[in-house]
Amino acid sequence: MTKAADPKFEALLRLGDNTLILGHRVSEWCGHAPVLEEDIALANTALDLLGQTNLWLEYAGEVEGKGRSADDLAFLRDAWDFRNVLLVELPNGDFGQTIMRQYLFDVFNRLNLTALTQSTDQRIADIAEKAAKEASYHVERSEGTVIGLGDGTEESHRRMQDALNILWPYAQELFITDEVDDAMAEAGVIPHPKSLQDAWDTEVRAVLAEATLEVPVAHFGHRGSGKDGKMHTEHLGHILTQMQWLQRAYPGQAW
Amino acid sequence: MYAQMVKSTGQGVKSLDEMDPVEREFQEKVDADIRIEPRDWMPEGYKKTLIRQIGQHAHSEIVGQLPEGNWITRAPTLERKMILLAKVQDEAGHGLYLYCAAETLGISRDDMTEQLLSGKMKYSSIFNYPTLTWADIGAVGWLVDGAAIMNQVPLQRTSYGPYARAMVRICKEESFHQRQGYDIMMRMAKGSEAQRRMAQDALNRFWYPSLMMFGPSDANSVHSEQSMAWKIKINTNDELRQKFVDQTVPQAEYLGLTVPDETLAWNEEKGGYDFAEPDWDEFFDVLKGAGPVNNDRLEARRKAWDDGAWVRDGLLAHAEKRAARKVAAE
């Protein structure tokens, strides 16, 4: 992807890649969750995220106009073409880390999607309408769990604080902006990420306080980020190795 | 169903005349197809056998998440990935209904889980076989869910109310699972040479383990006889196995795949196929823990349970704190 790439295509990839990679991570829990209800809830979350992925990437392929399907974009791009934030590609860690990551992302996703329902691009507004409802439910669930575990036992509190310390800097990447954001926000296609930051910060800090957790003083210290494709963690390549295996090993087959 | 070798009382079936009035009343209700509900009197053996059977079924749903979950992150398209996720999620839901049904008999889900992890309670032998390729996901849906449906459809009429009602919900979802499995097989069988080989290989590996799902021939089993008298087992293992083979062989033919049984032949007289028995020594070995992935399955479940202890404790502690705060505020 060169700098000349259509900013709308880029913006759609950012949406679709975040949900694709996070959906992949969450789906890794299948059959391994701490309680049966969590197995069901995590599978449900992953399913919603992958459903959103399908809609974003399908539209991204159309905007690009090179005949690529959602599957082509998901299964046939390499790491440098992915536009997800680093937060979502981090390994699951313990359940605390998984649910903290989910919460930090869910609040962003809900705020972003709610704003996207007002997009000047009707297709984006329609997808956001459907996805925002799912995201609200996700926030409800991850928020309750973060509070419950933060304000639970000594051990659960410690683990949630550890999770927050690891993830907080990565969450700040959600609000890093570049010329794609500027152009698309200017055209009313997406909200400017900066415009979501205060609401996110207020909401998340209140919940973390209720969870008796301390917000660390830290920021995301890299200029390039996952969303512009200039940086990823080493984990992304391994996710793709697994996710894309069949499509790469048996190219061009119908499944 | 995923219950094999469920032990019953070990005694022969009593006649109505041998029963005391309470037990006789119970048996007459069962005979008249009146459902037994949790508050009704029931023989201790009936209760114990049901706990074993429903518990084994529930555990099978839970352990059964693992072989399919194994392919969620590698599913070949977004649609297949979503379908598989939804299916595995359904299975966790089935586990939940079944544990709830068993809990009406006075055992907790945590107790049953501990018994699964200690090896005291079993799950279906089929889940001790690995899913090696994507076609295995098709084969599991087609054959394993197909065999499960064969077992579960009659259990919708089982004598114990909560179990029968759980089964009604489960059966609806299972038939969707079987269709998606067959759809994967169809795509593979009509695909490239490599995909056809993959599909045939999956059928080769899953055919006999699927036949084992019905349990060994129970013509002489005291357990089966008692369970059938109680209507917690409706058909014999052999009846169901025959039905399964008769249904599945034409499906394999339609796919252009070969059932790995040279003796397989249509028997006009009985109106069904003659087929080879699975290797029952292997079946008993796998039940005892010698299957290819028994250790992996139990280890995965133990790890999930142990690693999750702090989460369960944390959420419980929080719920207690909240309740205490609420009381203090009042």
Image (tube, rainbow, N blue to C red):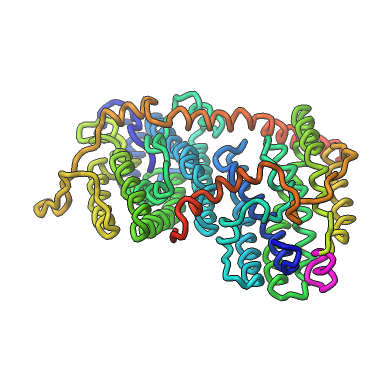
- x and y percent of residue A143 in the render? 76, 47
Q: Is A150 situated left or right of A42 in this image?
A: right
Q: Is residue A230 above or below residue A4?
A: above
Q: Quadrant of residue A118?
A: bottom right
Q: Quadrant of residue A121?
A: bottom right
Q: Residue at x 72, y 59 (%)?
A: A14
**Residue A221 lies in the magenta stretch:** no
**Residue B151 showing in the rendered view:** no
Q: Is B274 situated left or right of A50 in this image?
A: left
The C terminus of chain B sits in image quarter: top right
| Residue nearer the viewer, A130 or A242 | A242
Magenta extent: A180-191
- x and y percent of residue B278 in the render? 24, 37
Q: Is residue B146 above or below residue A29?
A: below
- x and y percent of residue B79 in the render? 52, 59
Q: How many marks?
A: 0
- x and y percent of residue A169 in the render? 83, 43
Q: Is residue A80 above or below residue B320?
A: below
The N terminus of chain B sits in image quarter: top left
**Residue A32 showing in the rendered view:** yes
| Residue nearer the viewer, B259 or B11 | B259
Instruction: Give the residue furthest to the left.
Output: B269
Q: Is A7 situated left or right of B130 in this image?
A: right
| Residue nearer the viewer, B154 or A187 | A187
Q: Is residue B278 above or below residue B111?
A: below
Q: Is B137 situated left or right of A122 in this image?
A: left
